[in-house]
Image (tube, rainbow, N blue to C red):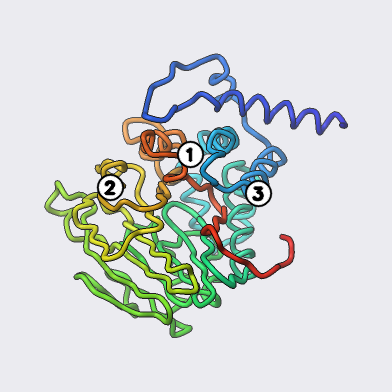
C-alpha cells in the first residue's frame, strides 16, 4: 500500500474509533474522551468520505450491521459538525441560480461534498433502477424519500440539489407541509408542467388538501391523515399532511406511512398494517411511543442531520446520527434503522433488473 493509502486507512480508523462509543442506544450519556476531542478537531478529506459513502452504499441496514454502520456514520458526523448552518443555506440558495458557486461550496466543505456526491448518485440510480418485484427506497435528505415499484415511482418531501430532474421519473409527489426543508419549488413546478399529480397544503397549481382524503394513482392508493406539527400549541395543530401509501400487489403489498413533522401519533390512523414507518427523530413525540402505536415492521428514523439547523445550543436542532439511534434504543435492530443521504434500501424479496454500475 502506498503512503497515501496508508494515510487514509489511518484517518478512517481514527475516526471510526472515535465514533464507536458515542451516543449509545437508550440515550445514555458518554463522557467526552480524548478520542472524541481528536474527532472534533479532525476534518475528514474527500477520499475518506468517499470510502465511507461507498461502504454504506454496499451495506444498507440489514438488521445486524448497525454497529459497523454507526462507525462509518461517525465520519460523516465529524464533517457535518464543522459546517455552519449559514453555509448550508447559502449552498441551497445557489442550487438553481449559480451552479458554479454550488460546486465551489461542495469543493470547500467536506459535508457539502458528501451531500452532493450522495444525492447525485441517488438521482442517477433512481433513473437507472428497474424494479421487477418489490420496492426500492432512496433516502435523499431530511425526511425526503423516493420509492420505486414495478408499477410506480413517487416521492415524499423531496429537498435536494437538481430535484427537478426527478420530474421525468416520478408519477406523483407528496409534500407534508410548507416548511422549506420539505419541498423544492423547481421540482413542484416541473411536476406541474408535466401534468403530474402533486399534493400539498398550500402550493398553487397542486391538489391542496387540509382535511382527510384519499387518492389513487395507478397501482398506489394514498390515504391522507391530518396531523399536528406541535399538538400542544394552538397554532401547531391540524397543519400536517401524513401519508399512507399502499403500493400494490407487485410491490409485495407494501404499505408506507410517512408522518412528516407530525408529533401527535394519535392522529396517525392507518387502515392497514404498516411495513415502513418514516418518523421525525425529535419533534416533541416519543419515537418509541409512535412505533408502539403503529406497530410497523420497520421504522426509518428521519429528519437527522438537517444542516440548516444549528448543532449547538441553545437551539441545537441538528439531530445527530447517534441521537437518532438513541431514540430507538429499546427497539430491536431489525425494527428500526437510520439511513444516510443517498442510500438505497430494498424491501426483502425485491428483484431488480440488472443496471449499469454507477
Q: Secondary structure at mark 1?
A: loop
Spatial CA span between label 2 and label 3 = 30 Å
Front-most of 29 and 244? 244
Crowdedness near tag 2: few (<14), some (14–19) or many (≥20) residues, C-alpha within 10 Å: some
> In the visual, does 83 lie left or right of 353?
left
The answer to whether one can see residue 94 in this image is no
Front-most of 323 and 26? 26
Quick one: which residue is furthest to the right in this view? Answer: 2
Front-most of 187 and 300? 300
User: Is label 1 or label 2 in front?
Assistant: 2
Q: Which residue is mark 1?
A: 84
The location of residue 210, given as percent across then percent down, is 21, 70
Crowdedness near tag 3: few (<14), some (14–19) or many (≥20) residues, C-alpha within 10 Å: few
Q: Secondary structure at mark 3?
A: helix
Q: Which residue is mark 2?
A: 290
| Marks 1 and 3 close (CB-CB < 8 Å) | no
> In the visual, does 4 lie left or right of 125?
right
Q: Is residue 133 above or below residue 19?
A: below
Residue name at image x 48 percent, y 83 percent: 194
Amino acid at each position: 500500500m502506498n503512503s497515501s493509502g496508508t494515510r487514509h486507512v489511518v484517518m478512517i480508523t481514527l475516526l471510526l474509533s472515535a465514533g464507536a462509543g458515542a451516543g449509545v442506544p437508550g440515550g445514555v450519556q458518554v463522557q467526552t474522551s480524548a478520542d472524541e476531542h481528536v474527532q472534533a478537531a479532525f476534518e475528514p478529506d474527500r477520499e475518506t468520505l468517499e470510502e465511507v459513502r461507498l461502504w454504506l452504499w454496499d451495506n444498507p441496514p440489514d438488521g445486524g450491521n448497525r454497529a459497523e454502520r454507526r462507525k462509518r456514520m461517525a465520519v460523516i458526523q465529524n464533517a457535518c459538525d464543522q459546517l455552519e448552518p449559514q453555509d448550508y443555506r447559502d449552498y441551497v440558495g445557489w442550487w438553481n441560480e449559480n451552479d458554479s458557486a454550488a460546486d465551489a461550496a461542495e469543493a470547500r466543505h467536506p459535508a457539502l461534498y458528501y451531500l452532493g456526491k450522495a444525492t447525485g448518485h441517488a438521482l442517477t440510480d433512481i433513473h437507472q433502477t428497474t424494479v421487477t418485484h418489490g420496492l426500492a427506497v432512496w433516502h435523499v435528505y431530511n425526511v425526503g424519500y423516493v420509492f420505486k415499484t414495478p408499477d410506480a415511482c413517487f416521492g415524499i418531501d423531496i429537498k435536494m440539489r437538481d430535484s427537478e430532474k426527478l420530474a421525468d421519473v416520478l408519477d406523483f409527489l407528496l409534500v407534508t407541509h410548507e416548511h422549506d426543508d420539505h419541498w423544492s419549488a423547481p421540482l413542484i413546478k416541473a411536476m406541474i408542467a408535466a401534468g403530474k399529480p402533486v399534493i400539498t397544503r398550500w402550493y398553487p397549481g397542486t391538489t391542496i388538501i387540509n382535511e382527510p382524503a384519499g387518492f389513487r394513482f395507478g397501482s398506489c392508493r394514498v390515504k391522507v391523515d391530518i396531523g399536528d406539527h406541535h399538538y400542544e400549541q394552538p397554532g401547531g395543530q391540524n397543519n400536517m399532511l401524513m401519508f399512507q401509501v399502499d403500493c400494490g400487489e407487485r410491490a409485495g403489498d407494501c404499505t408506507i406511512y410517512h408522518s412528516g413533522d407530525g408529533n401527535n401519533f394519535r392522529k396517525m390512523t392507518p387502515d392497514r398494517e404498516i411495513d415502513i414507518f418514516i418518523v421525525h427523530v425529535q419533534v416533541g413525540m416519543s419515537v418509541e411511543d409512535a412505533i408502539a402505536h403503529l406497530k410497523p415492521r420497520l421504522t426509518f428514523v428521519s429528519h437527522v442531520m438537517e444542516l440548516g439547523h444549528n448543532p449547538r445550543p441553545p437551539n441545537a436542532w441538528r439531530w445527530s446520527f447517534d441521537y437518532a439511534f438513541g431514540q430507538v434504543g429499546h427497539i430491536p435492530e431489525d425494527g428500526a434503522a437510520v439511513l444516510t443521504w443517498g442510500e438505497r434500501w430494498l424491501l426483502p424479496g425485491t428483484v431488480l433488473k440488472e443496471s449499469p454500475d454507477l
